[in-house]
Amino acid sequence: MTGAADTLARDPAAPAESHLFYQAHGTRPFIDRAEGIWMYGQDGKSYMDAASGAMVCNIGHSNPRVIAAMKEQLDRCTFAYRLQFQSEASEGLAAEIARLMPAGLDKVFFVSGGSEAVETCLKFARQWAIAVGQGSRYKVISRFPSYHGCTLGALAVTGYTPLSAPFDPMMRAMPKITTPRQYLDGRGEDPDAYGRRMADLLEEEILRQGPETVLAFIMEPVGGASTGAVVAPDTYYPRIREICDKYGVLLIYDEVMTGVGRTGRFLAAEHWGITPDLVAMSKGFAAGYAPLGAMIAPGRMVRQVLDAGGFAHGHTYAGNPIACAAGRAVVREIVEQDLSTNAACMGERQMAGLQALMAEFPFVGDVRGKGLLQAMELVADKETLAVLPKELNAASRLVDLAYERGLIIYFRRTRGGAEGDHVMITPPLTITPAEVDEMLDRLRGALRALHKEIAGRY
């Protein structure tokens, strides 16, 4: 008879049926350890993490100062429920985040991840509207394609059909406008004019829905995995802010992926001098050291909600002291090491390399992004940007070929999830020039292998 102790002592790398499941079939090597931008499997191979996990590990792996901060908190207290105690870790992190936000965004509500952060913004916005006598407002306009999370509320504002379609009968889908993708649908148009034209779609949708029913507009300032790091023309952002102000619509920035230095500023909003009404943050916030996210809101709105009876929302692990200790240490690393500036500088170097690869390979149709949030789109025709045949699974195959060469990248379907291929290249913000060059060399090798496989098949 096999006991629990025997099961635990068994070699985890030995062939055995796994009792875990995630999104799909398939396995990867067991992880042994990780340091900086490198991960080491129990298979004896090293892997360059050019995806930062899932755009999470902004400061790299196994940072000793973050680990020390977590250990110090572990020695003091592992859990304190927010309705029973305050903690120095959560109070300290909230204060540091408030100092880094645009003026007026000074109240922080902690959660455990990105979907929770977006859901919190949506529910807070609705409760604020009720508190100030605008209970007719409930619709949240978003964009297609987009990604805002997998909980039902966040999924209702997500524009990615394979993820949302199975659950359409279970939720109230929200109105969508088209995401600006000038490389695809505005080619040859003046960028400034295109940006304004795409922003004006929001005003048209507000009027179509009825301004008195529209609560908020939520957007990723730089596209995430659903669009492959799409950046709108500069004119888009102030026009969106202007339209929201005109109709009393709250502007929510989903900075789950873009925030905490990823695009070359602490918030991507800073690139355009925009102050959103609400901000959702996660991923790089605690950089993979602990589950952590947050909504950041103006104090005046928080007071109005609390005065009206309180915020009817919460999660058990909100403000967990270990997660907040990790987050505080991560934020200090970002600020003290000036990793936002490094993201901007290394992003320029990486982009130059990706553009060289686009010139080299006939199926690389576009490269784009900001800072170290970048993507490469694979196409059948560079002139028309026609998609590759879906059955090639080109982006997925490129990920596997890169993995064989010790390089981790991330893929998604580009055009609403139904078709198209792109890969995300989003290494930790600590990456060095030499590491950028090595990453590009490994990516070139994977692209060459893909070229051999698919040549003549599209």
Image (cartoon, helix red, strand yellow):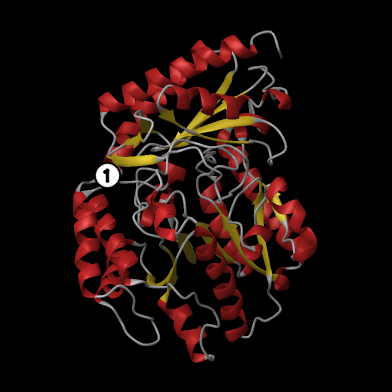
Q: Label 1 amino acid?
A: Leu
The image shows a total of numbered marks equal to 1
Q: Which residue is mark 1?
A: 339
Q: Would residue 273 be visible to someone looking at this image?
A: no
Q: From the viewer's perspective, is 16 left or right of 99? A: right
Image coordinates for residue 375, horizontal then vertical, percent: 50, 32
Callout 1: helix, strand or loop? helix
Q: Foreground: 353 or 139? A: 353
Question: Which quadrant does the C terminus fall into?
Answer: top right
Between residue 422 and residue 141, name the one nearer to us.
422
Specify whether residue 317 is in view: yes
Q: Which residue is at a point 45% across and 15% down the rendered structure image? A: 445
Q: Note whether 192 is above or below 296 in the view shown.
A: above
Q: Position of residue 134 (x, y in %)?
A: 65, 81
Q: Residue furthest front?
A: 1
**Closer to the camera in the image, 374 or 82:** 82
Q: Residue at point 33% right, 22% down?
A: 438
In this picture, is 270 found above or below 372? below
- Residue placed farthest to the right in the image? 169
